[in-house]
Image: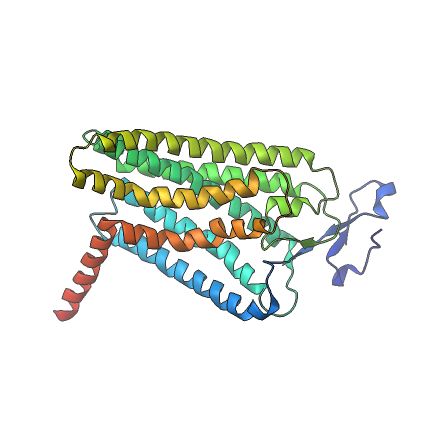
Amino acid sequence: MLAPPDESHSPFHISHDLPKMERVNYTLLTEFILTGVPHPPRLRTFLLVFFLLIYILTQLGNMLILITVCADTQLHARPMYIFLGTLSVIDMGISTIIVPRLMMNFTPGIKPIPFGGCVAQLYFYHFLGSTVCYLYTTMAYDRYLAICQPLRYPVLMSAKLSTLLVAGAWVAGSIHGAIQAILTFRLPYCGPNQVDYFFCDIPAVLKLACADTTVNELVTFVDIGVVVASCFSLILLSYIYIIRAILRIRTADGRRRAFSTCGAHVTMVTVYYVPCAFTYLRPDSHSTLDGAAALFPTAITPFLNPLIYTLRNQEVKLALRRIVGGQSTKSEV
């Protein structure tokens, strides 16, 4: 039984909005403690430096992609690169929401996260994460039109339509994030306050609720399941048509170029969706792999996106050369 401690030095707050009979034993949490990623103590410094480098390189790489798309006149009006620039913004956001807080777990001392901070982290992660799902689906549709309907592509996928699709992804993502945050934190949390995870996510936080979470777990499974399954199915369907169209191309060089334009997208969809499905679309598990799987969509994928899209995308590399060449020419003048 929890005794109401001194509120000024406690992670609990006594609720005065409950019936009289419940007030004695009912306290609400005001902060959470994130346990972080399990690791040997001797690796603490190494992991701190490792994730610091991951974070810095993620921000620099995605910023480079964003600047390239905005600065190059041949890219910033093309739908595919509008989507790529948006993806860079989202990757920087997800990395900023998760990785700095993760790094704090590798420093000495206990660093609790305020209740409001936990709410914000969960909301923005699911907001941006679901927006990525919608964006990947839109990018697959864009590739389908470019390869299967090349003559009608400029009409079917205009810059205006691509902008509307991006706006729709942002709006749908914000609604999804709000639903998940409201459902999760409408429940009372009255202790303990230790989240067995490295960030505030639904499965880990729900374990601390002092109320029945059956409805929450069902809605979470259905909601996230519908988003992931529908987006992945549409992506899969798009690539079935894309592969059929590519196989009909007569020249080997034409097939190679078509596959190269889709290879980066397929790689990132796989790296993103498989860990998400492992985390949310299976029965409750206390496996040590849960945290490792969650590192992919939160830290690894945002880091890999710029590398894969610049190394595998010839147009981005040419745009970088044009920008660097233009700067060199200006400096010589």
For residue 53, side relative to residue 103 (left or right): left
Q: Is residue 49 above or below residue 316?
A: below
For residue 267, side relative to residue 273 (left or right): left
Q: Is residue 305 above or below residue 57?
A: above
Viewer-closest of 122 and 146 = 146
Question: Which of the colour schemes (rainbow, by chain, secondary structure, one colour) is used?
Answer: rainbow
- Note whether residue 160 is visible: yes
Query: At 20% across and 54% down in the image, what residue appears?
Result: 318
Residue 126 position within the rendered picture, expressed as x and y whole percent measured from the top left = 52, 44
Viewer-closest of 262 and 59 = 262
Query: At 58% across and 40% down in the image, what residue appears?
Result: 180
Classify the position of the C terminus by image quarter: bottom left
Q: Is residue 58 above or below residue 179?
A: below
Q: Is residue 214 above or below residue 311?
A: above
For residue 134, side relative to residue 177 (left or right): left
- Note whether residue 167 is visible: no
Residue 297 position within the rendered picture, expressed as x and y whole percent measured from the top left = 47, 49
Residue 106 position within the rendered picture, expressed as x and y whole percent measured from the top left = 57, 66
Count the marks.
0
Residue 66 position within the rendered picture, expressed as x and y whole percent measured from the top left = 32, 53
Query: At 17% across and 41% down in the image, what residue appears?
Result: 253
Quarter-of-image position of residue 40: bottom right
Quarter-of-image position of residue 186: top right
Query: At 61% across and 33% down in the image, what residue appears?
Result: 219
